[in-house]
Amino acid sequence: MDLQSHLKVLLRDKYQNVNDLVLPINLRFRNTRDLPHFATHYSRHIDQSHLDAFEDFLSCSFEDLLKCTCNHGRSQRTVLTFGAPGIGKTTAVQKCVLDWAEGRAHTHIDLLFPIPCWELSLLENEKLSLIQLLKLFFPDLRELSAKRLSGKTVWFVFDELGDLDDTLDWPHPKVGNVNQVTLVENLLPNLLKGKLLPNAHIWITTRYAAIDYINQRFVLRETEMHGFNDEQKEQHIMKLVGDEVLADRVIDHIKISRSLDRLCQIPYMCTVMATVLKKRVKTNDYKIRPMTLTQIYSSLIDHSLYDFILGLSIFKDQSLAYYFCWTSEESLNEMTVAEPSTFAREYPLVFREEKSVRGVSMFRFAHLSILEYFVAMAKLNEETTMNPPEEYSTAFLKMIDKAERDCNHGQFDICFRFFFGLLKERGILQISDPFFVEIREEMLYYYYDNTNVNRFHWLREFDSQALLNDVEIFQNTGWYPFDNLTLEAWLTIYLMIVNVEGMDATIELELSMRCDEKVCRCVRELLKARKALLGFSNLSDACCPALASVLGTKESHLRKLDLGFNSITDRGVESLVLGLSDQDCRLMSLRLHGCELTSSACEPLASALKLCPKLKELDLSCNSIGDVGLKHLARGLESPKCQLETLRLSQCNIKKAGGFHLASALEKNPAHLKWLDLSINKIGNAAANELFTKFDISRLRKLEIYYCGLTERCCARISDALKLEESNLVELNLSSNNVKDAGAYLISSGLFAWSRLEKLNISRCGITQMGGFYLSKVLSCISALYSNDMQMKIGWQATELREMDLSLNKLTDDGAGYLSTGFKNPYSHLQRLSLVDCSLTCDCCSDLASQLSSSECLLSELDLSSNYIQDGGVKRLCVALKSPQCSLQKLFLRNCGFSSRCVPFLNTALKTNRHLTELYLMGNKLDDGSIKVLLDMTRSDAYKLNTVDVSID
């Protein structure tokens, strides 16, 4: 067997197990000079969760990496691959070696020698020639000779350069012969500089902290390992967990934290998280219980290890700076072999045993993060032993300040995350302690410091809601709670928190992806979104357990959940209520309109209302819950813990009995409700008056009771509420009730100057021209408000009414004429008026035009659609449109029976109009030429008009 074949057999046998691993493939070209100088610790390269978008680089394959493109006449013959500890560099080396040995790749290479640097470090005081060194690592290669090593297709791979703890740039004795005996530490520098085997190629892997060991003038090409991509993470976790459903739950738990998800790029840390979570996560438990990094490592490490590890001499009487000089790659050679061997077999994710080429047992921590966990524990033990409890805060702050002064390159980032997490686990401090206040304030005041995000990670290990309450205050009020903190500072911190948390404003499924399965796979996205708009998403009860898990998770940012018009039944609601009733639920709005619910769904919802004071909006519209359902729901509504502000029960088959149940509930708990919608229910006058008697509707901001079978007999109570100066009622919708002119009179009598009502809808209420007369008095009226000592405190003003809809009433031209007299009221606030299908003709248009031409008319939107005003009416309206005083911005004239003959008048009028931007003419008899004229008007700078809708009948 020749030398190459012999070497391949040896390497195949040595690395065969690599075929069973999920291998990182994210290799990218990147120069070391592009790395931030301050960031030498791996967490700062991997965990970039605070960035809005992650930096990307040109990708590279291992096949390309190991192709010969160097000039052997120069010193640059080395390719360098750097990356975080545990990112997969060693695995990648072994995979490449195995691919070569099995003939799958790198076939241009003649000989390939992989040499772990940790084994070289054990030989640093020995004298060997290069031939002797290779035969030590590959003892069966008797055919090895200087001639075979001098070719241009020979590769040396030195894995994990940092294990040498040495620089390759200081002067070393020259070695030019492969048979020349010298100190082992002289061989690599001479290979690197081309003095030894100048035709050979070198591949070096190293972690970030050891990049400075090698001078850049010797490096031909630089690449960075980026560990697992998202697909590989899931593949690796699936392989470790075994069960697909359980694996999905594990992945969901990891992805809750954007930081943990990023650290999961490191195969070792991904393995740790999956190993711990598969034991903690249960498929039959609706709730997601995310774990911090500290909790994961504490669960991994058996308590029996604590005394063993912390008893090592490296943890005694040393500073933190020293701990980080002793890395996870160094051996624990002061220990006896038997005891650590046992621990290495029992806890391979914590402690590992390696056999050197000479058969010596060497031990190391499985990863640098394990060492950092124990360093944090050692320092916590030390500080709590040396200081009384009342001095903990001061001692901890001094420790952190000293550590950051001594080493400010991020060496302590993960260590302090563990430290804060251990403080939480042991209950040593409360979040209100001055220690946390100081850390928090430092973070906020030094917002411009690019290392600030690490303090946020520390705080989150102790309290997952760190600073989030302040964020929510800022979001809701624009106010920030710290003195001397500028708006710029707060916005910077807010943006960082949003990025770290992965928060999003809204999640809405694409049309092609709307199904239960997609929702179940979007748990992380749902947790991070403020609003989940999942209406019309083809959902069923199957997605409800996943949604419940989101609702019941403390780390959830979801505040509004819209599930309208999905096939979610009573059973699905029962699942949702599990999350809704959880003490950690912070959902504020739940919309279940059109979801096929019955009265049975209201029992669990009532229970949830008693337990969820944060819920402010519940929409059950378009469900057949009936009187029985409202009776159940009333048990929750009457609870003092229920703080609903919006209750929507439109089209729920509620009748008189249901109205009485609701009245009774609101009588017992009246303080919170602001918006009540009972529309399209046959509650009738008796139930309405019962409600208005027991519950003060002046507390409401919005009341919708359209199409409820009401008459003028219920309007007196409404009028009384409107008359109250302290009334909060801003919107009132009474449409499609038979209140007639008598009801209009009562409503009008309540609309004095101090009424706050802004929107009034009494369309299709049987109102005639007399009702128009009553309402015109409201629009024309002005009043003066006085203080208690009869001094005028505001001045003259009219009602606050801004929008009024009188559509589908038989106002006739006289009624419209009455209304138009109110347009000239200089104190009027009316801006939108709808008179659709009010039996109007062209005769009313003169009065309307006259009033619209007044400078005192503020009306910006007028809808006269479905009235037979014809060409004559349009021509008269054009008189108003010509006036520079006319403030109309939108004019609706759909289905008004006019023709192309009025278009020239519109054309002329709109040339001088300064305000009209939208004109709606659909349903009239306009020819193609007229349509073209109108459309050309929207394109011309001569007109303000930018929107016109037209059609040919």
Image: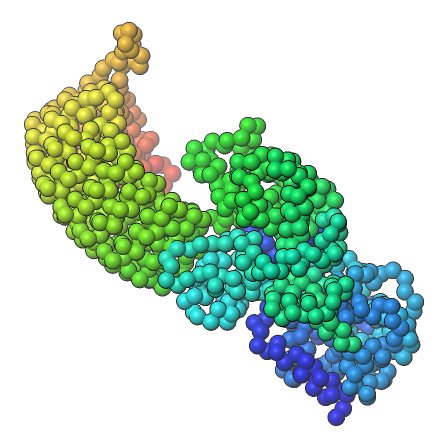
Position above or below: 241 against 51: below
Asked whether 736 or 479 is in front, the reply is: 479
Q: Quadrant of residue 665?
A: top left
Residue 144 percent location from the top left of the image: 82, 85
The quadrant of the picture occupied by the N terminus is: bottom right
User: In which quarter of the view is residue 809 placed?
Assistant: top left
* Residue drawn at 31 percent across, 14 percent down: 794
Question: Is 436 left or right of 950, judged from the image as shown?
Answer: right
The image shows residue 49, relative to residue 348, as above or below, that is above
Q: Is residue 910 visible?
A: no
Question: Can residue 326 be seen in the rendering of this structure?
Answer: yes
Rendering coords of residue 675 (x, y %)? 25, 36
Location of residue 829 by image quarter: top left
Write the residue at 56% across / 72% down. Answer: 22
Q: Residue furthest bottom?
A: 1
* Image height of 386 relative to 124, above or below: above
The residue shown at (32%, 32%) is: 915
Residue in the image at 74% along x and 64% along y: 335
Judge left or right: residue 247 versus residue 536.
right
